[in-house]
Image (cartoon, coloured by chain):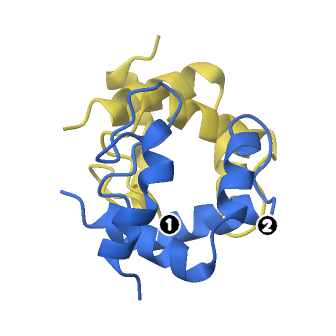
Chain colours: A blue, B yellow
Amino acid sequence: AGDAEAGKAKSMICASCHGVEGISAIPGYPHLKGQDAQYLINALKAYKNKERTGGMAQVMQPMAMMLNDQDMANLAAYYSQLK
Amino acid sequence: AGDAEAGKAKSMICASCHGVEGISAIPGYPHLKGQDAQYLINALKAYKNKERTGGMAQVMQPMAMMLNDQDMANLAAYYSQLK
C-alpha cells in the first residue's frame, strides 16, 4: 500500500503544475486532490508505458518514468487522502 | 463555451462508472466532480483520437467517439462546476 507521508515528500515535483494541495492553477492540468488512488496509479503507469500520448503526455511521460511502483503508490495515497 | 445544463443531461451515460455527482464508487475510475474543465476536454479528445490506449482506454475510447466538441464542452462545464 502507499505511504501518504512519503508521497507528500515526493509530490514536490508535481506541485509546480498540479498545485500545492493538488489543485492546479493552470487550465488543462488536472486537479489531483481527492482523486481515486487506483486511478492515479493507472494513469501514472499509462504515461510510463507510453499508453498515453499527445498533448500533455509529452510532459507527463518523463515524469512518470522517474517513478517506481512504490513512488506511484505513495503519491496516490497522498493525493487521494487530501480533503 | 460549455452549457452545464446540457452537460448534466448528457452525463447520464457517464454516471454508471463515474457516479451520479461525478464521485466514482469503483476503484480505478476517476472522480470527475470539480475537475478542471480544460483537462476534461483534453482527456476526452485524447480518448477520441486514440492517444490514450491500454487499460480503461478500451472502455473510454468508444464513449468519447460518441461525443462531438459541444458535448465535450458541455460535460466539462457540468462536472467542473460541481462543488
How dense is the environment of label 2, judged by Cα within 10 Å: few (below 14), some, or many (20 and up)? some
- Which chain hosts label 2? A
The dot on residue B75 is none
- Residue B37 coordinates in the image, percent (x, y): 44, 29
Please determine whether, in this image, residue B1 is positioned above or below residue A43: above
Q: Nearer the viewer, residue B73 or A26?
A: A26
Q: Is A3 or B81 nearer to us in this picture?
A: A3
Horizontal side, residue B61 vs residue B27: left or right: right
Which residue is denoted by mark 2 in the rendering?
A49
Mark 2 or mark 1, earlier in chain: 1
Q: The disc numbered 1 marks a residue on which chain?
A: A
Q: Secondary structure at mark 2?
A: loop
Give percent across and percent down for residue B33.
31, 45
Q: Taking B22 as reference, is B34 above or below it?
A: above
Q: Would residue B19 be found to the left or right of residue A49 on screen?
A: left
Residue at image location 81% in from the left, 47% down from the top: B50
Q: Which residue is mark 1?
A: A39
Q: Is residue A29 above or below residue A45?
A: above
The Cα atoms of the two marked residues, 2 and 1, are separated by 15 Å
- Quadrant for the N terminus of chain A, please: bottom left
| Residue A50 vs residue B83, the one in the foreground | A50
Residue B58, horizontal then vertical, whole percent: 73, 63
Which residue extends farthest top?
B1
Q: In the image, A11: left or right of B72?
A: left
